[in-house]
Amino acid sequence: MSCTPRLTQLLRLRGFRMTPQRLAILQALHDGGHLSPGQVYKRVAQTGMMETTVYRTLDFLAENGILFVTNRAKGHLAYELARASHHHLVCRTCGAQVDLEREALQPLVDQLFQRTGYRLDVGHFTFSGLCPVCLPDSE
């Protein structure tokens, strides 16, 4: 996995080490994009890792900025490696997803800062709605 040295160093800088469990989960996400905790577990189950360890490790990696977590359709979570900052549009009916570049929301982020003084952490936003296929004709 080409990102292993970078992520290992990032964890060490934050006072943590790269465990075999963290490495297995990062490899699963490196190979697969946006995965649910269940999908990650299926990919690492052959290592003997318990499902609770997968959930705890995913939470740990997200809290430490190694992973992005996305709310997908019907409240399900998906994880991905925290690479370039971007955002998602997710259809709440069919689960279709579109990635947006960070720049698409920057004017809104700037406007909110000017109005409120809040500096937003804009690494990863997820917006839910209806995709063009699921949008009723009456709207």
Image (tube, helix red, strand yellow):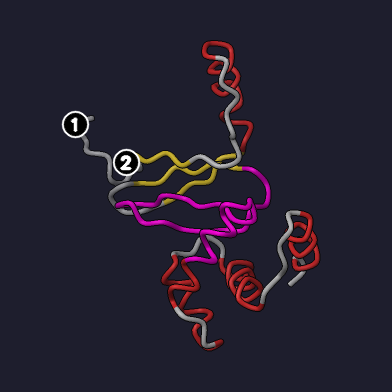
The vertical placement of 47 against 54, above or below, is below
Residue located beneath label 1 in the image:
138
Q: Position of residue 5 (x, y in %)?
A: 80, 66
Does 62 lie within the magenta span? yes
Q: Position of residue 96 (x, y in %)?
A: 39, 52
Q: Earlier in the sequence, mark 2 or mark 1?
A: 2
Does 88 lie within the magenta span? no
Nearest the eye: 28 or 137: 28
Task: Tell me the amino acid under the disc marked 2.
Answer: Leu
Determine the secondary structure under disc 2.
loop
Residue at 78% x, 55% y is 13
Residue located beneath label 2 in the image:
130
The vertical placement of 101 against 95, above or below, is above
Residue at 51% x, 82% y is 49
Q: In what quadrant of the picture does the N terminus appear?
A: bottom right
Nearest the eye: 121 or 85: 121
Numbered label tally: 2
Is residue 61 shown left or right of residue 8?
Answer: left
Question: Which residue of the protein is positioned furthest toward the top in this rendering?
Answer: 115
Q: In what quadrant of the picture does the C terminus appear?
A: top left
Q: Within 10 angstroms of label 2, few (less than 14), some, or many (20 or more) residues?
A: some
The magenta span reads 56-85
